[in-house]
Amino acid sequence: MHALFINPGGIGDQILLLPAVKLLKENYPDYHIDLLCEPRSSCIGELTNLYRKIKEFDFKDKNPEIFSLREIIRRRRYKYVISTGSSYKANFVTALADAEIKIGFKKGFFSKFLLTYPVILNKNQYTSNMFSDLLEPIVSDLSKKVAGKNLIPEIKLKMSAVEWARETLNPRIKERYYAKKIFIHPGVSKLSIQKNILKSWSSKNWATLIEKLIENQDNMVILIGGKDDHDTIDDIHKKLSFFARPKNFFDLSSLDLTIEKLGALISSSDLLVCVDSAPMHIAVALGKRLVAFFGPTNPKKLLPNNPKFIPVHVKNLECRPCLFDNRSESCSRPECLNVTPEMMLNTINIQLGSLKTV
């Protein structure tokens, strides 16, 4: 038997879906599970072996080829097609499938005609749990199995990637093997910026935080990022006050990182410091300690309730969180971005202090 998950969105959305996929596989181990996602997210296959096949379709295209999408979905006769979208469009896409059972979130009157099982959408929870609600028509006693639990994603790294990370890091840290490895990933996706979704922290703040962290010789600060982050990281370097690079600070952002290599580097960290972005979800899925800067988005929906993963955001700001709850893009006066370096540093020190008891 076969099942298909349709999950548009970035790599973070794919990681957040993994608990639901795992839950389906545990209850139906003989099922072959496929994924339909955007081309930018198909690299999820580097981080999990849960899928038989990963198919691509550009859901962001302004003029999507509906017949092409229909053909992709119907290349196999699925028993279950499960869509994670919460819009009319998502229900329509699900209805294109030649499947025995079509499942998605209830959206308006037409859901009952487009879907076999419209599932009531509960956004007020961790997104992995929200996605897992879609299995209610399939998995018996689902509510008992997940009651009171944060369904934390898990990813798998090949040993070759872990070895690559070790070989990359060891020459740089061999003189300071005792140091706490603090990885900093300051970037957000270019798509977020293009859509006026402001979730990033200023380069000046990152530079100030780095300078404060490297004052402690027991800290090793390592910058990482991908091709979308080069401008941000270049700007951070311009804002740093030192000229001779300290021995407990180096930059790996020039490396050509696949998503698996990025995961392998994060797996080598004692702590990841980042924004609400894909690396944050990778750290969660690897069980690594995390401090994440949050602006307009809601950490309760994007981070599990676990002391390993600490969000930092402006307190007592009535308008936040707003993004994706009340608006689809950022406002013109994003006061929620005004987290200070001191706020981040204090939280980082709490996390580093907890390492002594681990």
Image: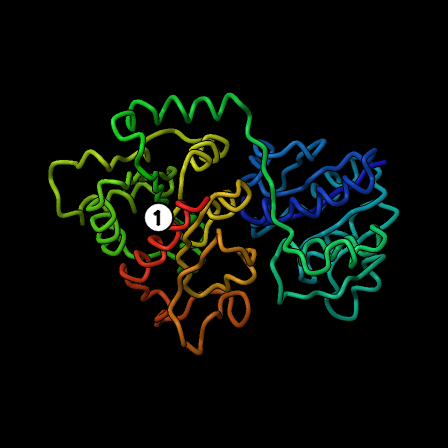
Percent across and percent down for residue 221 are: 29, 40
Instruction: Give, as a three-letter code, the residue at label 1.
Output: Pro
Percent across and percent down for residue 6 are: 69, 47
Left or right: residue 258 compared with residue 70: left
User: 106 or 23: which is nearer to us?
Assistant: 23
Q: Is residue 290 visible?
A: yes
Quadrant for the N terminus in the image: top right
Q: Residue furthest left?
A: 243
> Quick check: 196 above or below 221?
below
Q: Residue furthest front?
A: 357
The kind of secondary structure element at disc 1 is loop
User: 277 or 177: which is nearer to us?
Assistant: 177
Point 83% across, 39% down: residue: 28
Point 40% across, 76% down: residue: 317
Left or right: residue 202 compared with residue 242: right
Point 67% across, 41% down: residue: 36
The residue labelled by disc 1 is: 186
> Quick check: 118 above or below 59?
below
Q: Please tell me in which quadrant of the rendered image residue 276 appears.
A: bottom left
Crowd rating for badge 1 (residues with CA inside 10 Å; few <14, some 14–19, many 20+):
many
User: 92 or 44: which is nearer to us?
Assistant: 44
Left or right: residue 337 compared with residue 75: left
